[in-house]
Image (cartoon, rainbow, N blue to C red):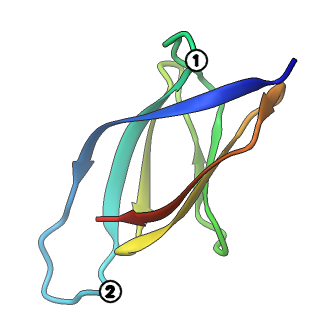
Amino acid sequence: MRKVLLFSLLSVFIGIGKLMAQDRILSGTVKDENGQLLPGVNVLLKGTNRGITSDGDGAFKLSVPGSGTLMFSSVGYALFVIAGVRL
């Protein structure tokens, strides 16, 4: 049985900038369907080489443009995709 990743945004920090294309920092926590924190989950911005791995508490911070598609992957879990993320 494949487990499903659940994604919970704890907070989104938006940097103040004059350009619309300026990157912003997206932060959040990755949890499983039971609410357990998941360390070592790959968080990737689709179509780019931008990505990070969640820390020991399942937390991550990723620099992203104003919108995009986030992909979450980990061994033993199904790929989880959030399309159209806007900051």
Viewer-proximal residue among 86 and 64 = 86
The amino acid on which the numbered mark 2 sits, given as a three-letter code, is Ala
Decide which of tag 2 and tag 1 comes sooner along the chain.
2
Q: Quadrant of the C terminus?
A: bottom left
Q: Kindly identify the residue that appears in the image at 58 percent across and 17 percent down.
A: 33
Residue 39, image quadrant: top right
User: Alpha-carbon neighbours of circle 2 within 10 Å: few (<14), some, or many (≥20)?
Assistant: few
**For residue 33, which numbered disc appears in the image?**
1
User: Residue at position x 55%, y 34% from top?
Assistant: 54
How many other residues sit within 10 Å of disc 1, few (<14), some (14-19) or many (≥20)?
A: few
Image height check: is 46 above or below 72?
Answer: below
Left or right: 10 with respect to 85? left
Task: Report the front residue among 3 and 50.
Answer: 3
Q: Secondary structure at mark 2?
A: loop
Please determine whether, in this image, residue 52 is positioned above or below residue 86.
above
Name the amino acid, label 1: Glu
Rendered location of residue 14, percent (x, y):
20, 61
**Quadrant hosting residue 34:** top right
The tag on residue 21 is: 2
Question: What secondary structure is found at the residue carrying circle 1?
Answer: loop
| Residue at horizontal 12 percent and vertical 71 percent from the top | 16
Residue farthest toward the right in the current orientation of the protein: 1
For the residues carrying marks 2 and 1, which lies nearer the camera in this image? 1
Q: Position of residue 11 (x, y in %)?
A: 25, 40
Image quarter of the N terminus:
top right
